[in-house]
Amino acid sequence: MPGANAVTDGYLTRSQQADMLRERVAVISLLFPLVFWVIADGGWLFWGGITLVLGLAVSEYAGLYRRSGHEPATPLMVVGVAGLALARFQTGFRLDPLVVGAVCLAATTWHMVAFERGWEGSGIDLALTLAGFLYVGWLGSYLIALRLLPEGLWWFLVAIPSIWIADSAAYLFGKWLGRHALAPRLSPKKSW
């Protein structure tokens, strides 16, 4: 029975995989000073950086479901995530109920209009829109809350590198010992 690497073996040779790893390390080495500067700033530059990352993340989330035939409201999710990040940056958690309520109302309206126009999957799409907004926006905005703590820079510099190290270790460990596909349909190259 072929292992998970059989899926990727047809795409990349060992040499190509090593080249890709070298490219990743080079990009990380180049971007690290910029990322550190944005994190250390802690002001509007930090908010913009986090909002950009969260916007890209929620767009990727929507793209995953779009490829399977669903239509989550991507523009609404991006605007909602940016609004929630701005609310966290400006007022902490005080405006969260207002932003979440506004996004829920707007998403319901968006998908009711889609239903009236004949889209039968609008109920599922509403759930996907709200789930993406909450999963990426609500949870991702905690990065801003963490950074805004009195010793937030240090907490952030403990949390984020820990995540990066764990993710990199999982990648390298999976490459080394991975035999079974973890989620073949969602991410065919991940193994355990």
Image (cartoon, rainbow, N blue to C red):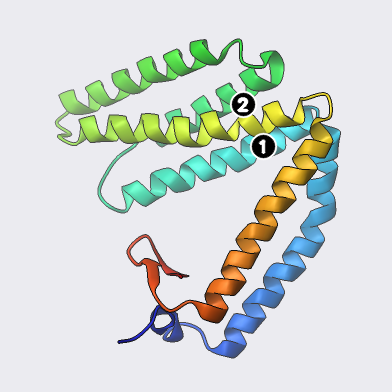
Q: Position of residue 80 (x, y in %)?
A: 50, 25
Residue 82 vs 31, above or below: the answer is: above
On the image, numbered disc 1 is attached to which residue? 50
Q: Tell me the SS state at disc 2.
A: helix
Q: Tell me the SS state at disc 1.
A: helix
Q: Residue at x 58, y 35 (%)?
A: 140
Residue 73 in sight in this render = no
Instruction: Give neighbour class at mark 2: few <14, some 14-19, many 20+ (Cα, 10 Å).
Output: many
Q: Looking at numbered disc 1 in the image, what kind of residue is underneath it?
A: Ile
Residue 69 in sight in this render = yes
Q: Residue at x 62, y 42 (%)?
A: 53
Q: Nearer the viewer, residue 85 or 113?
A: 85
**Mark number for residue 79?**
none
Q: CA distance from mark 1 to mark 2?
A: 8 Å
Q: Where's the N terminus, which quadrant?
A: bottom left
Which quarter of the picture shows residue 8?
Answer: bottom left
